[in-house]
Amino acid sequence: MTSPDPFRVIFVCTGNICRSPMAEVVFRDLAERQGLGSRIVSRSASTGDWHLGERADHRTIDSLARRGYDGSQHRARQFTSASFADNDLIVALDRTHERVLREWANNEDQEGKVTLLLSFDANADGLDVPDPYYAGADMFDSVLGMIETATRGLFLQLEPALRLPRTPRV
């Protein structure tokens, strides 16, 4: 028998060059460090098409590197209608993204996959991860800290199901 399909999570922000790539990289790293890298697929996308194919913003890559993450391989992509079927959980970085994603959903099942990242941080001051694009390195580091905390909360909710015993391979 084969192992179960991985749980697929996609993080969504405006341009897919700042916040959502951070969340994608942090969540993937967390899963790998917990020995569950093969059980999770972490992706990210944008609501707009401004930066398609571009690398993450250099400040994003730098902020990730300062904390020991590698964001150098990221290339921006856009969320599409197929993204609903291709993912088990759709995590918006702010309420604007959440609203757009819910509007794009074709049915209640798709809409039910959409959630806000900061809803997984009980101590968050609000529900929106601020966009650091027009700010400096300090803001990118602050946003990364928020994302790290919230992704840990998200992972803690998913981890029990991900750790269910696998069927041995024959």
Image (cartoon, rainbow, N blue to C red):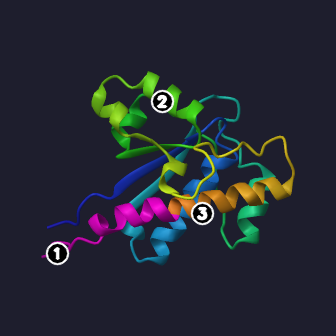
Circle 3 packing at 10 Å, graded few (<14), some (14-19), many (20+), is some
Q: Amino acid at mark 1?
A: Arg
Where is residue 93 shown, x and y percent of the image? 58, 43
**In the rendered image, which quarter is residue 26 located in?**
bottom right
Give yes or no for contact between labels 2 and 1 (Cβ–Cβ under 8 Å): no
Quadrant in the rendering for residue 17: top right
Question: In the rendered structure, which segment of residues is drawn in magenta?
Answer: 152-170
Residue occupying image coordinates x 47% and y 62%: 153
Disc number placed over residue 169 in the picture, else none: 1
Q: Which residue is mark 3?
A: 148
At 36% from the left and 31% from the top, the residue drawn is 111
The answer to which quarter of the image holds residue 59 is: bottom right
Q: Nearer the viewer, residue 9 or 135?
A: 135
Image vertical order of residue 170 relative to residue 9, above or below: below
Q: Is residue 167 visible?
A: yes
* Badge 1: residue crowd in 10 Å (few <14, some 14–19, many ≥20): few
Labels 1 & 3 near each other (Cβ < 8 A): no
